[in-house]
Image (tube, helix red, strand yellow):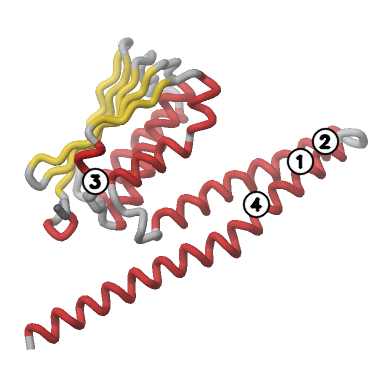
Amino acid sequence: IIGFVIWLRFKQILAIEKLKAGLAADLHDNIGSGLTEISILSELSANSAKTFSKDVANQIEEISEKARQLVDNMSDIVWFINPSRDTIFDFAVRLKDSYADLLHQLGIHFKTVNLDKLKSLKLPLNYKQNLYLIFKEALNNAIKHSNCKRIEFRAEMRENKLFLCLSDDGDGIDEEKDHQGNGLINMKKRAEEIGGNLMIDSGDKGTRIEFIGIIKKSFKLNN
């Protein structure tokens, strides 16, 4: 009986993983491609409209920007549910790739530390989603508001605890600004949702954002 229950559970897990992979492919092929087409058409229309009406061109450019944002959000969702991209290494690569162009344009050096040792550490789906959104917001703030030149992302496992840290050498966080204050509140809420703790240390020599949370045994390193 025990053997049958284990076999049945294994089949259920495989079915869920297959469903997630299928959903990721469908979202990418259908909705993602459609949004990309809307974005391109909007940009072309905006360029044409500039010769006729500035107001119309501005409205089309706004539509194009919204479409680009939707494309980015859809791309994130596809990545969230893709079972072949569940490791902490995949997480760090995705984080860097999301801002690769901007990092390059601003001359900001992005460094990862200790990730090679954690290549096989898989993240549960809720961890993967919330941690990505936490550190995407942190990276966005560092790039756009801190005037930093270096950003470091570090990952460690100590027994059953996962430590993630994003630090920069910028001006620090101005929590009085709405775009940063609200963002920090949301980041802390997301950490709490997955039973973790988010610590923020910011000053004139830079900002350090550290997450600490417990990883279940089934998601530990597979050596």
* Residue type, label 2: Asp
Marks 1 and 2, how far apart at CA: 6 Å
* Relative vertical location of residue 24 with respect to residue 182 in this rendering, above or below: below
Q: Residue 166: x, y in percent? A: 30, 29
> The residue tagged with tag 3: helix, strand or loop?
helix
* Residue type, label 4: Thr
> The residue tagged with tag 1: helix, strand or loop?
helix
Q: Give the mark nearest the N terminus, 3 or 1.
A: 1
Label 1–label 2 contact, CB within 8 A: yes
Q: Give the mark nearest the N terminus, 1 or 4.
A: 4
> The residue tagged with tag 4: helix, strand or loop?
helix
* Residue type, label 3: Glu
Dot 4 corresponds to which residue? 36
Left/right placement of residue 223 relative to residue 193 reads left
Q: State the residue at coordinates (38%, 43%).
A: 133
Marks 2 and 3, how far apart at CA: 44 Å
Question: Foreground: 209 or 84?
Answer: 84
Dot 1 corresponds to which residue? 59
Q: Residue 216: x, y in percent? A: 14, 56
Left/right placement of residue 28 relative to residue 170 reads right
The answer to whether residue 176 shows anywhere in this view is yes
Marks 3 and 4, how far apart at CA: 34 Å
Marks 3 and 1, how far apart at CA: 39 Å
Dot 2 corresponds to which residue? 55
Left/right placement of residue 46 relative to residue 119 reads right
Dot 3 corresponds to which residue? 192
The answer to whether residue 186 shows anywhere in this view is no
Q: State the residue at coordinates (26%, 73%).
A: 13
